[in-house]
């Protein structure tokens, strides 16, 4: 296992470098200019002298290759640079915003896992009954409805029915759990809807496969209670592919949080990314996307490790 | 088979129910009565000299604002939405949304009367940090007498040094994007701690108006060099003091207990304990938060932009107050005369004849009431009367006649079968709708086959300047509606002269209007300029959009202006 993790880590390095290089180049191709943003917007008349003075001040006049090596050098020192927009270190901006995104991600994962697995199991146990059809329809809706549309729908329904919208003051779960829940339960449901669907469908098919296995039949033949057959024998094996899927869906949660945070005005890292793009803050965008790359690479690796830990049959060479 | 059928039925039911819910929630039922926004049209000011011909002293302007009809109540935090956070806080760089963060913090040397919504004109200019001022007989030396006892929010006294520093900074291209407004300023000198003398290189009739704009903020000399991206920069003399900023979430200012203004009854301003601006990027989320009572006021930047939003407010927050006013910014169509068909005046005239702004505005905003059509390129009193503009454009005739005339012009120009036209605009829905309607009119009546390409907002200036377009919609930016703001669009070498418009005789007129201090004379020049420009028809006159803002019924004392200190909350109070 140790050597496997080591090799995975080694392979992560070129992936990581490729991703951050791509991000660096894309940010330079993007239209717009933070200096124009700072000096009156794209439509304003700015004297070239003013533009150059600001570019010089922000260090944007140095050659591209030098900017790239400065960026890479910063990464090796764990320094994501200083935001062109706010003037603060990217790390401090990100650390301020991350708790909201992490909380939203955890909320949505908790909701999705706690609903997906029972839905999948019930659907499998009640195969081809009206309960199964109902749950499968729910799952297909989760897959086919875009989450931003579902989010706006949720907001409208709650607003129309109760004249209620989420509070504008934000609090972390540790500061004020009630406010935090009020703010995040709608986006967490909207974000988790897709994960519920994906998880439930995977759980159902996996469960159906396992329920037809000989060892389950043997367990039943031995006279074990049905609950024990399902939860101890069948579910343990059926859940393995679901873990993989959930791990991969974490990436989708990260991507989805960008949209949810914008729709629900949550000051998380996803919104910070959008704001940074709008301000053409290349340093901030590089920093945030670098962190996202690290999260995705780490998550994928962790999923593989957990998979091996849950299923002793899995051996890595 | 039966099970499959049930499964399919269930799916259809779910989709149908979701669509139905969406339709019920989002799409409001038709408005019971069509709203007729009554735009606050600026009254035509009397034609009087903008600056006296001899050395005069302006009357001392009391630092008061009108007293509300009822006794205002002190206290409360006003909650507002903001769409975006600023790139920096320095008003001398005038980014579009900076004002909403910084203007309540800073004051200018002069200001505009808030009780008269008649425009950013000379007769509305009053003192702010300057109590009174003298103008020399040759209109070259302005002496300002400053209000004494004013303190910066950090406790330091406000003195002539701060004014000299601010004026010098505003005219420095490396430290201010508004330096072109101060190009005629030679120097600013301190006479004593509370007197400043500003010398101009040549007369500048708009100088007092420029000083009264919110962007001409006085900044503290002792804070020179502070990074404008840092909230440390937010030390002013305005009615509110910066308290806190939570990135991505909110920005709070609190009452300045030492603010130098009182209302007419002698009550200390401001009335509010503070103002919190919540960052809400999504437009519909602004309205959600407003109708659910989480906000005291709707969007203060763009306001309500169309009939749909207005209908929603009327339906979901029927008690809310909505006010309308006219903007000084008018969307206008521009021709690229480098393109062969458009180099022919007859083609431009033909296309112009078909333009019907109320129809175009209806398509863009949901109703003709969302714009005003009584001015051309210049605002009143500088521009031509609308009757003359309509005559120049041929818009005074019935539409059938205009169509026939347009078709004849196209035939005469050698384009009876039309041509292809490349239309471009910023990727803004309203602009795209305007061009779609115009394109449809051109296609139906003149066989012009147009394609519309929306350009990403950050790229639009570059596209415009490269002349990689044939027909665009764009709004020339004017802050108070002064003609001088349009020089850069039409003068040779002007920073935004994307047309490449080159009329040396008109350049002389532009320069002349910029230094003519007699209003009547200046109006004559600007009207001549407008007449010439519209006769050349490289640009056609547009319409000015109507701005709307909503607030809760308990919010009082709101002054909704489109000029100067456009987000002044010093007179606002809450009757709760």
Image (cartoon, coloured by chain):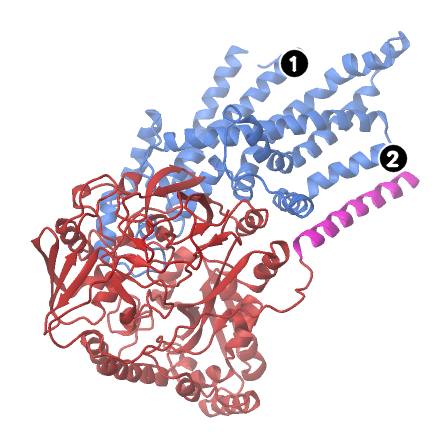
Chain colours: A blue, B red
In front: label 1 or label 2: 2
Q: Secondary structure at mark 2?
A: helix
Query: Secondary structure of the magenta portion, mostly?
Result: helix
Measure the C-alpha gap from mark 1 to mark 2.
33 Å
Q: Chain of mark 1?
A: A
Q: Quadrant of the N terminus of chain B?
A: top right
The residue that disc 2 covers is A130
The residue that disc 1 covers is A310
Residue pictured at 53% horizontal, 76% vertical:
B358
What's drawn in magenta, residue-wise? Answer: B1-27
Residue B243: name its quadrant. top left
Q: Is residue B347 above or below residue B378?
A: below
- Mark 2 is surrounded, within 10 Å at the Cα level, by few (under 14), some (14 to 19) or many (20 or more) other residues, namely some
Q: Which comes before the other along the chain, label 1 or label 2?
A: 2
Q: Chain of mark 2?
A: A
- Mark 1 is surrounded, within 10 Å at the Cα level, by few (under 14), some (14 to 19) or many (20 or more) other residues, namely some
Image coordinates for residue B338, horizontal then vertical, percent: 36, 76
Residue B218 shown in magenta: no
Residue pictured at 73% horizontal, 51% vertical:
B19
Q: Which of these two is toward me, B46 or B14?
A: B46
Image coordinates for residue B391, horizontal then vertical, percent: 43, 89
């Amino acid at each position: 296992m140790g050597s496997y993790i080591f090799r995975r880590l080694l392979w992560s390095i070129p992936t990581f470098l490729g991703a951050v290089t791509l991000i660096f180049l894309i940010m330079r191709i993007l239209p717009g200019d933070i200096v124009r943003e700072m000096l009156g917007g794209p439509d304003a008349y700015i004297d070239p002298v003013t533009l150059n003075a600001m570019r010089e001040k922000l260090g944007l006049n140095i050659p591209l290759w030098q900017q790239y090596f400065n960026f890479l050098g910063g990464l090796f020192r764990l320094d994501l640079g200083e935001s062109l927009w706010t003037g603060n270190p990217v790390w401090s901006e990100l650390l301020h915003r991350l708790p909201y995104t992490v909380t939203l991600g955890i909320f949505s994962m908790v909701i999705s896992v706690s609903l997906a697995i029972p839905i999948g199991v019930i659907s499998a146990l009640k195969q081809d009954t009206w309960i199964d059809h109902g749950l499968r329809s729910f799952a297909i809706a989760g897959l086919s409805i875009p989450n931003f549309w579902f989010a706006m729908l949720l907001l409208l329904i709650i607003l129309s029915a109760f004249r209620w919208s989420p509070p504008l003051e934000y609090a972390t779960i540790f500061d004020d759990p009630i406010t935090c829940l009020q703010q995040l339960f709608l986006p967490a449901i909207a974000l988790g809807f897709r994960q519920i669907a994906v998880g439930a469908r995977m759980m159902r098919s996996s469960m159906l496969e396992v329920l037809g296995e000989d060892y389950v039949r043997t367990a039943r033949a031995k006279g074990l209670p049905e609950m024990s057959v399902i939860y101890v024998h069948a579910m343990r094996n059926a859940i393995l592919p679901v873990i993989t899927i959930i791990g991969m869906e974490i990436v989708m949660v990260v991507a989805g949080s960008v949209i949810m945070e914008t729709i629900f005005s949550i000051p998380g890292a996803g919104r910070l990314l959008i704001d940074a793009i709008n301000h053409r803050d290349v340093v901030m965008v590089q920093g945030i996307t670098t962190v996202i790359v690290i999260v995705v690479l780490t998550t994928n690796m962790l999923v593989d490790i957990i998979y091996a830990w849950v299923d002793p049959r899995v051996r890595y060479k | 088979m039966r099970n499959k059928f049930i499964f399919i039925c269930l799916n259809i039911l779910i989709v149908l129910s979701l669509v139905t819910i969406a339709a019920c929630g989002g799409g409001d039922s038709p408005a019971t009565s069509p709203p007729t926004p009554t735009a606050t049209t600026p009254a035509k000011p009397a034609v009087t000299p903008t600056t006296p011909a001899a050395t005069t002293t302006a009357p001392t302007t009391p630092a008061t604002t009108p007293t509300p009809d009822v006794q205002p109540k002190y206290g409360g935090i006003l909650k507002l939405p903001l769409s975006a956070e600023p790139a920096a806080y320095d008003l001398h760089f005038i980014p579009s949304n900076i004002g909403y963060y910084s203007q309540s913090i800073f004051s200018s040397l002069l200001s505009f009367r808030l009780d008269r919504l008649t425009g950013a004109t000379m007769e509305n200019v009053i003192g702010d940090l300057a109590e009174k001022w003298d103008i020399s007989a040759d209109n070259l030396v302005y002496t300002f007498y400053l209000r004494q006892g004013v303190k910066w929010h950090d406790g330091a006294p406000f003195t002539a040094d701060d004014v000299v520093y601010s004026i010098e900074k505003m005219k420095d291209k490396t430290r201010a994007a508004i330096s072109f407004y101060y190009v005629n300023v030679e120097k600013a000198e301190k006479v004593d701690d509370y007197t400043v003398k500003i010398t101009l290189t040549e007369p500048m009739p708009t100088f007092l108006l420029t000083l009264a704009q919110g962007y001409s903020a006085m900044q503290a000399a002792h804070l020179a060099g502070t990074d404008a991206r840092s909230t440390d920069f937010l030390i002013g003399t305005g009615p509110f003091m910066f308290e806190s900023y939570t990135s991505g979430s909110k920005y709070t200012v609190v009452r300045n207990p030492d603010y130098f203004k009182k209302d007419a009854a002698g009550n200390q301003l401001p009335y509010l304990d503070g103002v919190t601006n919540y960052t809400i990027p999504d437009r519909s989320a602004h309205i959600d938060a407003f109708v659910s009572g989480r906000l005291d006021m709707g969007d203060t930047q763009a306001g309500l932009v169309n009939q749909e939003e207005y209908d929603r407010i009327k339906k979901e927050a029927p008690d809310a107050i909505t006010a309308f006013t006219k903007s000084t910014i008018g969307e206008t169509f521009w021709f690229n005369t480098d393109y062969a068909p458009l180099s022919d005046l007859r083609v431009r005239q033909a296309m112009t004849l078909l333009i019907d702004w109320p129809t175009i505005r209806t398509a863009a905003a949901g109703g003709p009431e969302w714009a005003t059509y009584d001015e051309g390129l210049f605002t009143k009193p500088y521009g031509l009367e609308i009757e003359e503009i309509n005559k120049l454009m041929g818009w005074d005739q019935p539409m059938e006649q205009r169509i026939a005339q347009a078709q004849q012009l196209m035939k005469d120009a050698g384009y009876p079968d039309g041509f292809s036209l490349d239309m471009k605009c910023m990727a803004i829905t309203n602009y795209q709708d305007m061009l779609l309607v115009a394109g449809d009119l051109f296609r139906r009546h003149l066989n012009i086959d147009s394609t519309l390409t929306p350009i990403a907002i950050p790229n639009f200036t570059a596209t415009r300047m490269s002349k990689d377009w044939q027909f665009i919609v764009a709004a020339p930016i004017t802050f108070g509606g002064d003609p001088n703001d349009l020089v850069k669009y039409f003068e040779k070498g002007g920073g935004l002269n994307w047309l490449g418009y080159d009329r040396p005789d008109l350049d002389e007129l532009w320069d002349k209007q910029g230094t003519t201090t007699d209003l009547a004379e200046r109006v004559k020049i600007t009207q001549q300029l407008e007449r010439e420009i519209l006769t050349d028809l490289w640009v056609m006159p547009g319409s000015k959009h109507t701005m709307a803002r909503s607030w809760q019924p308990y919010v009082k004392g709101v002054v909704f202006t489109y000029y100067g200190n456009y987000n002044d909350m010093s007179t606002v109070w809450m009757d709760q």
